Amino acid sequence: MRCFNCHGFSLTSFCSACREELLEYSLGIRKLEGNFKVYYFYQYEQIKHLIHFKHKFQGYFVLNALAKLSFAKFKDFFNPSYEINAIALDDKTYKDYSHTAILTHHLKTKFIKPMYHTLQASSEIKYSGKNLQFRKSNKRLYKLLKYPKYPVILVDDIVTTGLSLLEAKEILEKNNIEVLFALVLANAKFDIM
């Protein structure tokens, strides 16, 4: 087997050197419209080659390994004393797994309760490689399929423009559900021009 990061020989998804390198993240914060906070572990450019695996079968292994190095460690930064729901954005199964469900699963603690198949996009439009105007004109059209009992953390893999997260936040708040913040693997700077 080969390391998904450096392609060197490894018995696990990442060799020990790459694993150490990926553990050297620093939790960053990006503020979206309305001062909505999005916490991220990596800059997109650092791990884009790994995130692109989400479109392949191997993505299941890559995202699990990344989530163990980041999302599972989130309790070191955030340890609430009350119950919270973590909701994956649009966790439909693709290639026999959901990348957002994998990330959400790794947040589970005594107080953080993951919820699945809760917030689903009714639009099938893909945003990858699309400009800001396209994204604004083609909303995700989220549907709330389950109602969380507790305040919510939104989970996604990347924040680019932040429009998907803001749209998800809006529908939850319209249903009187408090959204605390969002948590993503990577922050992608987006050229608005």
Image: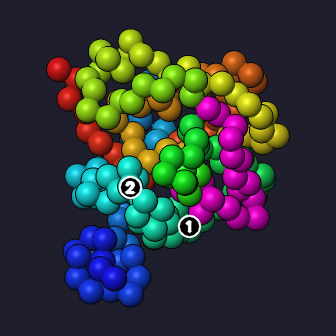
Label disc, if present, on residue 72 of the rendered structure: 1
- Residue 142, relative to residue 114: is it above or below? above
Q: For the view shown, which residue lies furthest in the right direction?
A: 149
Q: Quadrant of the C terminus?
A: top left
Residue occupying image coordinates x 26% and y 23%:
131
Q: Amino acid at mark 2?
A: Lys
Label disc, if present, on residue 56 of the rendered structure: 2
- Relative depth, front residue between 133 and 183: 133
Q: Amino acid at mark 1?
A: Ala
Observer-side mark, 2 or 1, equals 2
- Residue 181, relative to residue 185: is it above or below? above
**Residue 42 visible in image:** no
SS at circle 1: helix
Q: For the view shown, which residue lies furthest in the top direction?
A: 137
**Do residues under tags 2 and 1 come within 8 Å of each other at their CB atoms?**
no
- Per the model, the C-alpha gap separating discs 2 and 1 is 23 Å
Q: Position of residue 153 (x, y in %)?
A: 62, 44
- Relative depth, front residue between 82 and 132: 132
Q: Position of residue 9 (x, y in %)?
A: 27, 86
| Position of residue 151 in the picture relative to residue 105 (left or right) | right
Q: Earlier in the sequence, mark 2 or mark 1?
A: 2
Magenta stretch holds residue 107: yes
Q: Quadrant of the N terminus?
A: bottom left
- Residue 143, relative to residue 95: is it above or below? above
User: Which color scheme did the rendering employ for the protein?
Assistant: rainbow
The stretch in magenta equals 103-120
Label disc, if present, on residue 166 of the rendered structure: none
Q: Position of residue 159 (x, y in %)?
A: 39, 39
SS at circle 2: loop
The quadrant in which residue 102 appears is: bottom right
Magenta stretch holds residue 17: no
